[in-house]
Image (cartoon, coloured by chain):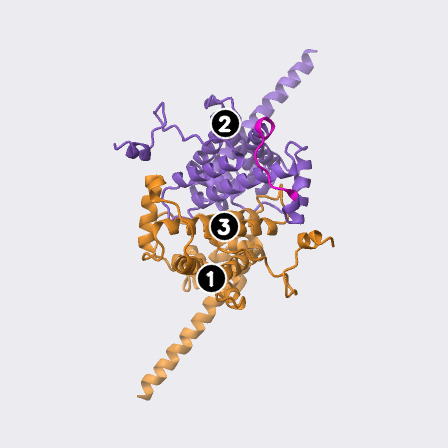
Chain colours: A orange, B purple
Amino acid sequence: MPMNDKTNTKMNRRDKLREATMAEIRHIARELLVSNGAQAVTVNAVARKMGMSGPALYRYYSSQNELIEALRLDLYSELVNTLTSARERSGATDPECRLLAICRALRQWAVTHPAEFGCLFATPAPMGLERCTNASQSGRAFGQVFLEEIVAIWRTKRFPIPSLEDMDPSLAEQLCKYSERIDGALPPEAAYIFLSCWMRLYGLLCMEVLNQIGFAYSDLEPVYEECLQDLCRLLDIPYEEPVPAGHAGTIRKDRLREAGL
Amino acid sequence: MPMNDKTNTKMNRRDKLREATMAEIRHIARELLVSNGAQAVTVNAVARKMGMSGPALYRYYSSQNELIEALRLDLYSELVNTLTSARERSGATDPECRLLAICRALRQWAVTHPAEFGCLFATPAPMGLERCTNASQSGRAFGQVFLEEIVAIWRTKRFPIPSLEDMDPSLAEQLCKYSERIDGALPPEAAYIFLSCWMRLYGLLCMEVLNQIGFAYSDLEPVYEECLQDLCRLLDIPYEEPVPAGHAGTIRKDRLREAGL
């Protein structure tokens, strides 16, 4: 039926235009975030930059919250892509190496995108576990990238776990619930190790990105690598030093010094 | 000379009025921070709430930055008072117990003042070490409260330290510079342990206050206590369980369970 076809094509074209406008809005919102901080991302500021009126923009995003939520969704998806690309690029088939590749790509993204990292991880998230928003689902997709490797390590070789009995009962209970929530992919004790790893990485990234340790450290890369060593100990996997850009092997200054160079 | 006296009194009275107005401005700025977030703390918003004009308020704080800096100064000083009061209230004379009291008071303040914690610790600090502002000096006063106890522990009983030789050379160099900056109060190796402790606490507090771990944990107190246990291991000091409010002794549910209660 050609008429229907034509209607569909028309609809599609209109939808595509709408999509393109919405993408442009989010693009400008991100520019504002990066140049002037999260507080600068307002519907009116974006509208002004686009030569639209505020009310016209509200036809695309009906509130500032909705706009920022959409922006966060973009950022999560970019971050997930960055992490999975780094994972594939590493060429590693074992979860240990894949995990290290992911962790390093996370820091790389964080330090090169501090405003974006801040928007995702250093602004208060609404309280309440079950905020069924798109952005929180993207947040889960992000966590999933890490969780998958830890699950793979757990399934293939296990790692040392604490006993629930020795834990504070409230903590043990929370871990059991969380284990259920991830469909038992990890038992509560192994979930504890996963969460400990994530909390260590998160804290360090916040310190660096928010420049809260500048009073002591100006270069946090070696501190991050030490943290990765700790993680490897927790997960009982070998720690592999990062491959310096442009090097095939891993040559570190201390190695050279040890060799008397 | 009575005339001089009178002039002084007049000056003092005017200064006092000015001080009171400035305190009220900061009080309202804090209310805005708590109720609507940092982005709501603008000179105009404060002026509106005080029934002043914006330009009138600029005679007290000449920019939004200056206003927020003044607010941060207040917050740091409140936090330092909170920590030192908890330290005194603990009645402990040994630095181990004093340190635990301070760490617990820090979490207490953070979780009861999330907006204020966010303003001090979860907003990007300007880059560059030597930002000689009042707020950064207050930041140092805050760090000093922790540093003092670690220095006392180091002086009286030492704790295990890593070797600079085994470290990444850039890290070792940064630690040497930091040790100099704190006038050698801790040698670089011991400073490393101090900074590791602080980074662990900081990361956990950010996770809790910014609700970034809500996907797994709803109550972080036991996780914080485990972190304090780790710190005690790092510092080779005994871990003392917190005294529950209203209890003279330390009774924990797991203890009761162990006792079959």
Please tell me which residue is depicted at 46% across the width and 40% down the height of the picture.
B227
Q: Which dot, 1 or 2, sits closer to the camera?
A: 1
Please tell me which residue is depicted at 31% across the width and 44% down the height of the picture.
A173
Answer whether labels 3 and 2 touch (C-beta < 8 Å): no
Badge 1 element? helix
Identify residue type, mark 3.
Arg
Answer whether labels 1 and 2 touch (C-beta < 8 Å): no
Please tell me which residue is depicted at 47% across the width and 29% down the height of the picture.
B101
Identify residue type, mark 1.
Pro
Q: Chain of mark 1?
A: A
Badge 3 element? helix
Q: Chain of mark 2?
A: B
Check chain identity for marks 3 and 2: say if they share one.
no
Q: Is residue B174 magenta?
A: no
Q: Which residues are magenta?
A: B154-164
* Residue bearing mark 1: A95
Image mark for residue A233? 3
Indicate the position of residue A75 as horizontal and vertical percent values. Answer: 48, 60
A177 and B238: which is toward the camera: B238
Q: Residue furthest bottom?
A: A2
Where is B154 relative to B131, above or below? above
